Image (cartoon, rainbow, N blue to C red):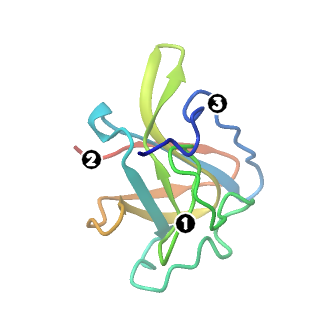
């Protein structure tokens, strides 16, 4: 029998604490990607050993704990941080997206977990929310 690790996942807002050199990345995605996980790392670092955030993000959301389905980054085993694509409330209804909070200014590569090809690169600027769409 399988149970959800967080039955309230996706039911609330994501709080973004941005400013200075800290920004956030919102990756919109088609509904068909709901529940899939997108991994992230600094551009060009994917071939390196995962560093669970190292110095390129801010905050405590890079723990080793399992919180699948909560929309926040998490790691388990040797992996780069990743977040789930979830339905997010907007003024125009739900939109599917993965939200990466607390990223330092820089360029990032993204792919589907566990080992899909790099599908997207995005530039994040401090003090801003960068929004980009997952390639179809």
Residue drawn at 41 percent across, 53 percent down: 37
Q: Nearer the viewer, mark 2 or mark 3?
A: 3
Q: Nearer the viewer, mark 1 or mark 3?
A: 1
Residue 62 vertical position relative to residue 95 in the rendered view, above or below? below
Residue 10 in percent (x, y) is at 54, 32
Q: According to the image, label 3 marks what residue? A: 13
Residue 28 in percent (x, y) is at 41, 38
Question: Is disc 2 placed on a helix, strand or loop?
Answer: loop
Question: Is disc 3 placed on a helix, strand or loop?
Answer: loop
Check the picture and name the quadrant holding the N terminus. top left
Q: Nearer the viewer, mark 2 or mark 1?
A: 1
Residue, far front: 1
Towards the viewer: 102 or 12 = 12
Check the picture and name the quadrant holding the C terminus. top left
Q: Is residue 66 left or right of residue 44?
A: right
Q: Earlier in the sequence, mark 2 or mark 1?
A: 1
Towards the viewer: 34 or 44 = 34
Residue drawn at 51 percent across, 79 percent down: 50
Residue, far left: 136
Q: According to the image, label 1 marks what residue? A: 75
Alpha carbon of mark 1 to alpha carbon of mark 3: how far?
A: 21 Å
Residue 7 in percent (x, y) is at 57, 34
Q: Is residue 132 left or right of residue 136?
A: right
Q: According to the image, label 2 marks what residue? A: 135
Alpha carbon of mark 2 to alpha carbon of mark 3: how far?
A: 24 Å
């Amino acid at each position: 029998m399988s149970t959800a690790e967080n039955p309230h996942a996706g039911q609330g807002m994501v709080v973004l604490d941005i400013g200075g050199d800290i920004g956030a990345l919102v990756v919109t995605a088609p509904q068909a990607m709901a529940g899939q996980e997108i991994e992230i790392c600094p551009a060009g670092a994917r071939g390196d050993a995962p560093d669970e955030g190292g110095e390129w993000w801010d905050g405590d959301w890079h723990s080793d704990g399992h919180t699948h389905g909560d929309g926040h980054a998490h790691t388990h085993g040797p992996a780069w941080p990743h977040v789930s694509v979830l339905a997010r409330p907007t003024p125009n209804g739900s939109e599917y997206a993965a939200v990466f909070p607390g990223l330092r200014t820089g360029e990032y590569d993204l792919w589907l977990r566990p080992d899909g090809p790099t599908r997207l690169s995005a530039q994040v600027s401090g003090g801003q929310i960068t929004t980009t769409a997952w390639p179809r």
